Amino acid sequence: MNDISTALNPKNIQLLEDFEKFILGDDYPCLMAKTAVLSQQFDFHVYEKMASITTTQDILNGLDRYLEKVNSEENKFYSFIATFPNLTFENESMFEKVFWQQLQLLHNLDKVAWDKTVSNNPADANFSFSIRGQAFYLIGMHPKSSRIARQAPCPAIIFNLHSQFEQLRSMGAYQKIRTKIRKRDIQLQGSINPMLENFGIASEVKQYSGKATDKTWKCPFHTNIAQKNKR
């Protein structure tokens, strides 16, 4: 059973239903997200603020439960959804700023060494964000996103274990699914997200917030020296 922090709260239950409706819409491009919602393979959490110490610790506690669950099962296709319904952002730049502040706090409070299967350098093509010693692919979503597929009902961060995608590769299904998703994204918006690159070709950090960047953009996240020394 998935961990849903909406117990006895009508507003949160409505938010969950709105998210499910958004993902299950006919035009929504990500087939993996659709599968996760249809099979209820996700944890759904509601938080008051982004980039606060209290919220960050709550997210880490939730991720601990999430990881304990997915690591004890063979099925790794399970997402962690953190939502922030009380927040509004006027534009993508504002969301991007707070998004990276939240990731920096998660890293600062996480005492576990970086996942050794990926780089801890945001400029490295092999970079992935690591929490609790495991690599994640992150997706920022909010109503003001320029990408229709990321215009969620409220600001949110989706956490997906990188091992999910590696499992798809080992099954020989990753490229086929990726092609279908990109084709559906073109049908929805007329183009694929210009920030998308195949993993290993360019750093995935430009994909996280959803905001388009140019060559002058520098990732605001930095790995702590203590964490680097653990690698």
Image (cartoon, rainbow, N blue to C red):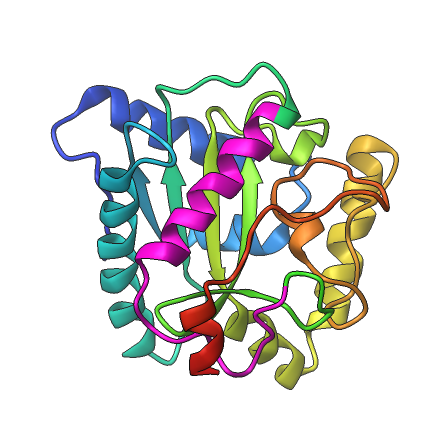
- In the image, residue 230 lies at what x, y percent? 42, 81
In this view, 66 is above or below 216: below
Asked which quadrant contains residue 201, the reply is: bottom right
Do we see residue 76 in this rendering? no
Q: Is residue 227 left or right of residue 89?
A: left
Q: Tell me the residue at 39%/74% (across/down).
A: 133
Q: Tell me the residue at 32%/29% (across/down).
A: 49
Quadrant location of the N terminus?
Answer: bottom left
Closer to the camera, 90 or 173? Answer: 90
Inspect the magenta stretch and tell me whether residue 120 lies in it: yes
Q: Tell me the residue at 25%/71% (across/down).
A: 68
Do we see residue 161 in this rendering? yes
Q: Tell me the residue at 56%/28% (across/down).
A: 95
- In the image, residue 105 lies at what x, y percent? 38, 48
Q: Is residue 61 left or right of residue 15?
A: left
Outermost residue to the top:
90
- In the image, residue 182 lies at what x, y percent? 79, 51
Q: Which residues are magenta?
A: 94-121
In this view, 19 is above or below 181: above
Q: Is residue 14 left or right of residue 193?
A: left
**Number of numbered discs overlaid on the protein picture:** 0
Outermost residue to the left:
8
Q: Is residue 188 left or right of residue 131?
A: right
Inspect the magenta stretch and tell me whether residue 55 lies in it: no
